[in-house]
Amino acid sequence: MQFSSSLLENAVNEFAKLPGIGKKTALRLVLHLLKQDSKEVNQFSEVMSRMRSEIKFCQRCFNVADADICSICANSARKQEIICVVESIRDVIAIESTQQYNGIYHILGGVISPLDGVGPDQLNIDSLVNRVQKEKTEELIFALNPNIQGDTTIYYIQKKLQASAIRITTIARGIAFGGELEYADEMTLARSLQNRLPVEKYMSH
């Protein structure tokens, strides 16, 4: 791809670094910005810059936040005694889109995967155990992707919490085995949450 301007080329190269964005799409985005009023482009740039420099992560659940505690954790209308354990922020967004869950979350930041060099110590597991022990948690819902890594993570955390008298469940397998939560349609994900199973029954399947 040849460019008559190094400024244009540099902008295209930066956009092309984004996941799922090829050079042609990057060029289309840059040319779109080039047509916009300079104030709009400056606002776009400022919003991205502020997002990166000012965004925080909730000290309780590790969700993105504008303050030390995210808006979900701070919402007194949410059921604080129910924690949905997810792998990533994208999973929180997917579940929130269903509008069928009114508890709170805990983001692990990944799943246990020895082949990828990811062990329990690299995830937000100890903080989850501490939350369950200190807070009045009644139920832990695992909403991890239904694959070997997700199942291993559930098993590990369940063992860490075996002394705790809380209900531990997982979403039903309404989502195809090996599928990802963020790509599931909202109705399927909502049903999987509503039809959740005790971990013992799930792990025996």
Image (spheres, rainbow, N blue to C red):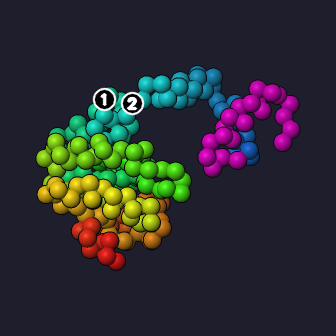
Q: Which residue is painted at 44% across and 50% down in the image? A: 119
Locate residue 7, reporting x and y percent: 76, 26
Q: Secondary structure at mark 2?
A: strand
Q: Residue 201: image x %, image y %?
A: 26, 74
- Could you tell me the amino acid type at mark 1? Asp
Q: Is residue 93 magenta?
A: no
Choose between 33 and 77: the one closer to the eye.
Answer: 77
Q: Which residue has dot 1 on it?
A: 68
Q: Residue at x 22, y 43 (%)?
A: 131
Which mark is on residue 56?
Answer: 2
Q: Is residue 49 at all visible to an observer of this figure?
A: yes
The answer to the question of whether label 1 and label 2 lie on touching residues, with beta carbons closer than 8 A, is yes
Mark 1 or mark 2: whose residue is earlier in sequence: 2
Give the x, y percent position of residue 104.
25, 47
Which span is picked out in magenta?
1-22
Left or right for 145, reference 42: left
Q: Is residue 184 visible?
A: no
**Between 155 and 73, the one nearer to me in the picture:** 155
CA distance for labels 1 and 2: 7 Å
